[in-house]
Image (tube, coloured by chain):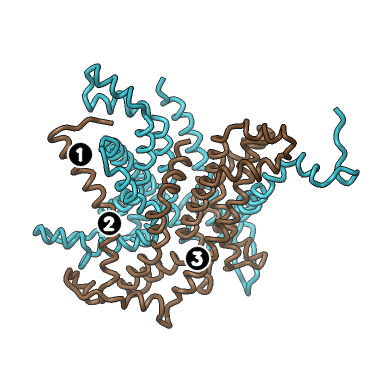
């Protein structure tokens, strides 16, 4: 077949556009991703091996490849932050999946009120995380928070929710569970509702009890969305920043220091752009490893 | 799905009621606090004369920037939403319906996935430097650009899911009748994906409105958005509890509006993005 001539040799512009439509339509998105995500990551690679200071609005780059690496190896706070983030993510996501699944199955067994439940549960998903943080900061308040009002009404000592180093991380996890369980619910509820009634009725005729139906039929059938939701949530939990920033700013001590918060402090409170980039690179690499491992694990866990 | 009788039925309803209560109660409580004087908040009193002082202070007092913050948030959220919808829809159409080389689309989608997983703060350092270099430091334009990038992956996946649901025959018929590819997209497929556009737009708007970490680090006093302002109330040397509560309630208004009027689209968008 003869190739059509390009528009500068007689082909009309609209024909040219139409023939290369895929590139014209993908172009803007590619441009955005290249300029705003790939280029910054490349920048990160250069910045990670330098020390960057500002003098009279000018950037002074000093190339010092080993110092940042050495600082990374000796960064105790980062290690603590990584550990906290993992504990936070695993605990929060496990609770969210359990409660979300239980609620999804329960609500799908209701005859009415489904719409109402769904409407109320949208609120935490859409509420600004910052507002959630300040809301819980008020509720957790040692002296006048509603939670301690309830605790003292029961005749107990007020609890220092955010101020005690053993409890602060748990308090932050509770907020995350409040925030994200509704999201898990919405996804699992849609999947549970998608199961055909006949399968469940057939199982019931064969003598399966409620527990049997849940463990033998509902859970295996919604396994793929369940895994997706869990993975999605783990990754989101790894990014946590807003609420922790508001609730504790990492304190007391380093009890609730998380990865993003540590990055923020290195970049914008200690003004170490170079070392911050080294940290960012390390986090990106760790995340890529995690994705790779979880993909292998996901393939191994697929029910046959 | 289950059939609940007697006790288990009562327990089931009880648990659901508890879940709904726990979800709603904190918000009602903070709304209550926003109507109290500072003294009533600090006393934790339940009987008080509600007044709008905190709202008036947040919105009208001379030392508050909150009206400016709202304006900034509206500008950033609406312009980033419109841009991300246009860019994302075009890309989603190309990826689902046009002949894109497999390695291109795999690389493209793989990168959107990875980018979406990165903690936003890993990229804030280079963004800060880049926007400084091109003279956009702490400008609204810079914030809009970052929000476009942050919301692009989600928009593309959602729109791809919507395009996939439309039968290929529609487009083929139009092509046979002599319609250009771009006209088939514009006149036939795009009108059919209106629900998808609304769902993606609604979510992009809310996520941009809520976005905190970039707004915190790349704006200054004149360009700060609503979440940054809310955080300021909570972070000042002496926490202003009343104003903080009022600002939090005000910042939740878009979410509340959507909860009552756009919930069909929100649920559709959230479940579609994650399940498919």
In percent of width and height, residue A15 lies at 80, 42
Indicate the secondary structure of the residue bearing disc 2: loop
At horizontal 13% and vertical 34% (from top left) the residue drawn is: B6
Mark number displayed over residue A165: 2
Mark number displayed over residue B73: 3
Which mark's residue is nearer the viewer, 1 or 2?
Answer: 1
- The residue where tag 1 is placed is B12
> Which mark sits nearer the N-terminus, 3 or 1?
1
In percent of width and height, residue B245 lies at 32, 68
Outermost front residue: B177
In the rendered structure, the colour chosen for chain B is brown
Along the horizontal axis of the image, is A165 left or right of B172?
left
Disc 1: which chain?
B
Label 1 neighbour load within 10 Å: few <14, some 14-19, many 20+: many
Chain that the image shows in cyan: A
Where is the C terminus of chain A found, in terms of image quarters?
Answer: top left
Q: Are marks 1 and 2 on the same chain?
A: no
Indicate the secondary structure of the residue bearing disc 1: helix
Residue B11 falls in image quadrant: top left
Q: Is there CB contact under 8 Å for labels 3 and 2?
A: no
Compared to B145, does A225 lie above or below? above
Residue in front for this viewpoint, A223 or A258:
A223
Disc 3: which chain?
B
In percent of width and height, residue A206 lies at 24, 16
Q: Is there CB contact under 8 Å for labels 3 and 1?
A: no
Label 3 neighbour load within 10 Å: few <14, some 14-19, many 20+: many
Query: Cα distance, mark 1 to mark 2?
Result: 36 Å
Indicate the secondary structure of the residue bearing disc 3: helix
């Amino acid at each position: 077949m003869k190739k059509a001539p390009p528009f500068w040799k007689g082909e009309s512009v609209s024909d040219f556009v139409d023939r290369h439509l895929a590139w014209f339509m993908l172009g803007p998105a590619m441009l955005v991703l290249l300029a705003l995500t790939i280029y910054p990551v490349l920048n990160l690679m250069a910045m990670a091996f330098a020390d960057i200071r500002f003098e009279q609005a000018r950037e002074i780059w000093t190339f010092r490849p080993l110092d940042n690496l050495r600082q990374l190896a000796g960064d105790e706070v980062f290690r603590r932050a990584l550990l906290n983030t993992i504990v936070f993510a695993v605990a929060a996501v496990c609770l969210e999946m359990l409660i979300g699944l239980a609620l999804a199955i329960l609500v799908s067994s209701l005859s009415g009120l489904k719409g109402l439940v769904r409407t109320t549960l949208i609120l935490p998903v859409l509420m600004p995380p910052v507002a959630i943080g300040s809301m819980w900061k008020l509720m957790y308040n040692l002296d006048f928070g509603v939670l301690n009002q309830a605790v003292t009404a029961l005749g107990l000592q007020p609890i220092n929710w955010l101020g005690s180093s053993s409890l602060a991380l748990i308090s932050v996890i509770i907020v995350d569970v409040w925030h994200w369980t509704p999201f898990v619910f919405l996804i699992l509820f849609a999947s549970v509702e998608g199961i055909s009634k006949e399968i469940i009725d057939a199982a019931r005729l064969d003598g399966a009890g409620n527990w049997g139906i849940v463990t033998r039929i509902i859970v295996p059938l919604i396994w793929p969305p369940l895994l997706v939701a869990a993975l999605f949530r783990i990754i989101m939990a790894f990014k946590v920043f807003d609420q922790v920033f508001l609730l504790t700013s990492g304190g007391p001590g380093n009890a609730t220091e998380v990865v993003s918060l540590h990055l923020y402090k290195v970049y914008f409170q200690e003004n170490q752009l170079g070392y911050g980039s080294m940290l960012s690179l390390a986090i990106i690499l760790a995340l890529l490893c995690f994705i790779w491992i979880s993909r292998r694990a996901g393939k191994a866990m697929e029910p046959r | 799905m289950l059939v609940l009788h007697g006790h288990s039925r009562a327990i089931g309803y009880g648990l659901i009621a508890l879940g709904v209560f726990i979800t709603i109660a904190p918000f009602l409580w903070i709304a209550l606090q926003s109507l109290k004087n500072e003294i009533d908040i600090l006393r934790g009193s339940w009987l008080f004369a509600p007044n709008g002082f905190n709202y008036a202070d947040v919105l009208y007092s001379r030392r508050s920037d909150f009206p400016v913050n709202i304006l900034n948030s509206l500008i950033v959220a609406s312009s980033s939403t419109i841009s991300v919808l246009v860019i994302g829809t075009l890309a989603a159409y190309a990826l689902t319906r046009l002949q894109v080389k497999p390695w291109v689309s795999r690389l493209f989608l793989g990168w959107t996935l990875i980018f979406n997983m990165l903690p936003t703060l890993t990229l804030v350092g280079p963004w800060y430097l880049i926007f400084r270099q091109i003279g956009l430091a702490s400008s609204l334009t810079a914030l809009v650009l970052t929000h476009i990038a942050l919301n692009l992956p989600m928009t593309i996946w959602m729109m791809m899911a919507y395009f996939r649901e439309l039968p290929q025959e529609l487009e083929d018929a139009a092509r046979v009748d002599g319609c250009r590819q771009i006209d088939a997209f514009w006149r036939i497929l795009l009108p059919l994906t209106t629900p998808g556009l609304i769902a993606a737009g609604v979510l992009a708007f809310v996520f941009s409105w809520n976005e905190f970490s970039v707004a915190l680090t790349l704006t200054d006093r004149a360009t700060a958005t609503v979440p940054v302002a809310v955080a300021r109330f909570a972070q000042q040397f002496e926490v202003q509890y009343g104003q903080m509560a009022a600002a939090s309630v005000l910042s939740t208004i878009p979410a509340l509006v959507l909860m009552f009027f756009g919930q069909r689209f929100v649920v559709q968008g959230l479940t579609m993005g994650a399940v498919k």
